[in-house]
Amino acid sequence: MAVKKSGEDVNTLKDKFHKDEVDARVRATLPYTDGWHNRFHIDAPFSLISDPNGICKCGDTYHIFCQWNPVPQNQNWHKNKSWMHTTTKDFINYTMPELSLWPSDIYDKDGCHSGCGFVEDGKLRVFYTANARDENYIRSVAQRFGTLQEDGSISKDEIQVLGNPEGYTAHFRDPNFFYRNGVRYFAMAAQRMSDYPAKSSRPTNGATLIYREKAEGGWDLLGEVKTDYYDFGYMWECPNMLQFGDTDVLIICPQGVPHEELQYQNHCLAGYLAGHFSVDSLDMMHGKFHELDKGFDFYSPQVMANEARHILVGWIGMPDLTDTVETAKDGWLYTLTMPRELIYKNGKLYYRPVEEIKNLRKDCTNIDVANTAAISEQLAKGSESDLTVTFGAARKITVAVKWGEEKFTMNYDRDTQIMTLDRSGMKLGGNGIRPFSDGKNTDVELSTRKFKLFANLDLQFDLFVDRSAIEVFMQNGEEVASLLIYPENKDIAPVLEITGDKEIEKISGKIWELGELTWK
């Protein structure tokens, strides 16, 4: 692969990225003082974080990497793609975030893009996409390995897998390992150049490619995963190939899928196909595409399978929407989800926060109210509300989180079985409609999300409210929604209100104040 020394000048990289200086600046930033910085979510200490990478366990330590721009600025947020790194043994106490991987040579001079982490010979290793551009901004990609060093940096190996194969564009990235019958494979995000106009309405389509490790070293391209979703967005990012017993689950992030009234409402999706995958034929025999999260802001998840647990970390953010992020004014953008455990049952994935998050619980309020039309409860600035609403005569239920006159609401209609998430009551952040210019029905409604949610006699939810991030797990984890939210008054704690259009038979459960993550 020929890479010209242009675009980002490779000779200036050593003057641009200084690990010691970046790490010192991170240490000086913590603990956070900004009223929108979160208590129990991992935020960017400064600049922008995005895709989780390298999620793996080495010994008794969990490693979490994510994409990060370590160069403070206020405009080119997605430039200088590097990796931030932190570790934890309990998902409560973390090591200080540090710069771990950054552009340094002609192969990755324009960005160290997403990849995976794994353990080999007792060492933590990574496999990532190296990105470079020429003077015409034409992309060249390569995949390379690296090894985590004692000082927290990643030493880089020589290039292992070169370039994008014929028939696929240079949007070719995010390698992720999986194993079948003792053999190592990796799934790769790809963009197919459409050769079949009769099948496709687009010049490019998203796809997932599969590579198999050769016994003598190197990799064989086996081909493309065969699914029923040939024309489903122009790019599929961040593949994860998982196993739950005898069921295979392929997670993908399609971009540019046309919106529908009750699904596919984000510009970029994150979801999965569940069924059976053959590494011989590459057929994926699957059901429908399920979204992983029904909120406004969720993308590029990565999953670690370890000790019979599948732990997902996602990005609470959305590509191309940095102008809706209020914290940009303070020099930082986005956050990561709480770690979630995935459980496969009844033909689909269910979600719950990892058990360790319960150790953040502090003061508890018991809720047990019968025959009421409304309740109001004061929340802490970081809280969890695990509640069940037994409908009784009520046909419509509204759950509101209020900061003075501002509010975020969840509105459930029993007659339609539709849940509506609505943040139009907030003054700042995502509101209205954000147009996109590709002409394929990809304008983004920033204020509401609607989706089907079955609730017979009860509506159950586990609601986590942080300073600028909300995650809510519904119907015992059948659905989950993540979103960013920016109360204008950063100093006040929110109030939780639950109301019905008629008398509610019962509201029961618990509300906890949640403590903060700690940084060593």
Image: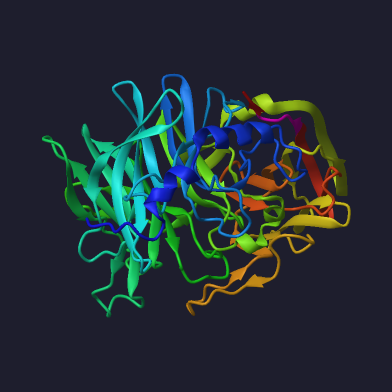
Q: Is residue 515 magenta?
A: yes
Q: Establish if 380 lies above or below 484.
A: above
Q: Residue furthest left?
A: 216
The image quarter containing residue 368 is top right
The quarter of the image holding the C terminus is top right
Q: Establish if 289 lies above or below 276.
A: below
Q: Is residue 366 left or right of residue 325?
A: right
- Residue 90: x, y in percent? 56, 23
489 or 426: nearer the eye?
489
Q: For the point 36% across and 41% down, which residue is it?
A: 242
The image quarter containing residue 452 is bottom right
Q: Is residue 349 left or right of residue 148?
A: right
Q: Which residues fall within the magenta stretch? A: 513-517
328 or 369: nearer the eye?
328
- Residue 354: x, y in percent? 56, 32
Q: Main secondary structure of the magenta part?
A: loop
Q: For the point 66% across and 57% down, which residue is it?
A: 325
Q: How many dots with numbers? A: 0
- Residue 489: x, y in percent? 85, 51
The image quarter containing residue 217 is top left
The quarter of the image holding the N terminus is bottom left
Q: Is residue 346 left or right of residue 188?
A: right
Q: Is residue 278 left or right of residue 59?
A: left
Q: For the point 21% across and 31% down, which residue is it?
A: 182
Q: For the point 41% across and 67% down, which residue is it?
A: 233
Q: Is residue 4 magenta?
A: no
- Residue 367: x, y in percent? 81, 35
134 or 145: nearer the eye?
134
Res 278 seen here: no
